[in-house]
Amino acid sequence: MKQQRLRDALEAMAAAPGLEGCALVEVEGGMVWHHAGHIEGVQTFAEAASDYWRLYTRLADQFKDLGELRASAMIHAHGRITLLPCGAGMLLVTLTRHKSEVDWTAWQHKTKELARLVDQI
């Protein structure tokens, strides 16, 4: 039941205006729990993007004066990948296109709701 609620919440998030897709990924191993969206290869993007986060964790001492990493955005020629912690040991990977009109405040609220669901599992 909780897994279905998690899937439903992720699908609702991926359906938000401006979002191409999103996925929940285990930080440590890069395994995708769930993914949703209308862009081909969301799961592949998510697995690969989680490497960015793991690279940061390996090099965290180099950035300690900046404090804990709260989010990461990689801007590519044709889109953006945004990474955000989402519950214990999980990462939310979100894909958007350039100039997409995303309500980032609503996205953050949905991310917090998603994190609560993740932590209940």
Image: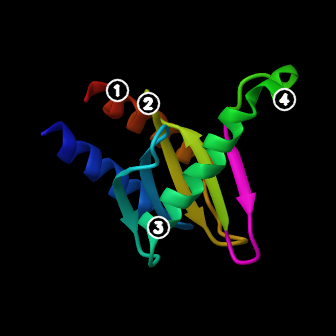
Q: CA distance from mark 4 to mark 3?
A: 29 Å
In front: label 3 or label 2: 3
Residue at horizontal 18%, vertical 47%? 4
Q: CA distance from mark 4 to mark 2?
A: 25 Å
**Label drawn at residue 87:** 2
Q: Position of residue 23 (x, y in %)?
A: 43, 55
Disc 3: CA contacts within 10 A as few (<14), some (14-19) or many (>=20): few
- State the residue position of label 4: 62
Give the structural element (helix, strand or loop) at label 1: helix
Residue at horizontal 37%, vertical 28%? 116
Q: Amino acid at mark 4?
A: Gln
Asked whether residue 32 is drawn in magenta, I would say: no
Disc 2: CA contacts within 10 A as few (<14), some (14-19) or many (>=20): many
Residue at horizontal 43%, vertical 47%? 25
Q: Earlier in the sequence, mark 3 or mark 2?
A: 3
- State the residue position of label 3: 44
Q: Earlier in the sequence, mark 1 or mark 2?
A: 2
Quadrant of the snapshot with the N terminus: top left
The span picked out in magenta is 71-79
4 and 3 marks in contact (CB < 8 Å): no
Q: Amino acid at mark 3?
A: Thr
